[in-house]
Image: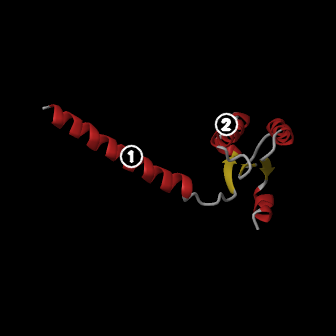
Amino acid sequence: MLEGFFGAVFVGLIILGVFAVVYAVLLKLLLKAKYEYYVLIPSKHCGKNVSAAVYAARMKMNLIGDEDYGKVIVLDTGMTEKEKLGCQNICRETNGIYLFTAEDLEEYLK
């Protein structure tokens, strides 16, 4: 009975060790280079909470450690002047957040 218990614990530790080695190889040693990416937020679908959506997207990038690779782009699809001024202030204060119209975005991504 005691031999069976110790055998099960031993097999469990072996399986745990195999999973730890596989995790280390796949996720730590074979990491691909990070590429630049964009999060596009259309202003029409956010309503009056464009600034909250922009800050949330940028905060999530900072949380996962991609502040150097990710950029938040707010697409102006009919913002009022007040919303546009608020968004421009956010863009000036925070790195990695940009405000574009559809034409400017097309030119930027070329």
**Dot label at residue 108:** none
- For the image shown, how many numbered marks are present on the structure? 2
Foreground mark, 2 or 1? 1
Which part of the image, by quadrant, shows the N terminus?
Answer: top left
Disc 2 + disc 1, Cβ < 8 Å = no
The residue at the point 52 percent across, 52 percent down is 27
CA separation, marks 2 and 1?
38 Å
The quadrant of the rendering that contains the C terminus is bottom right
* 28 and 39: which is toward the camera: 28
Residue at horizontal 71%, vertical 36%? Answer: 55
Classify 99 as above or below 107: above
Q: Is residue 93 above or below residue 103?
A: above
Q: Measured from the top left, where is residue 105 in percent x and y?
A: 77, 59
User: Badge 2 is on which residue?
Assistant: 56
Amino acid type, mark 2: Ala
10 Å crowding of disc 1: few (<14), some (14-19), many (20+): few
Write down the residue under mark 1. 17
**Residue placed furthest toward the front:** 3
In depth, the one of 107 and 56 nearer the eye is: 56
The residue depicted at 27 percent of the width and 44 percent of the height is: 11
**Amino acid carrying mark 1 in the image:** Gly
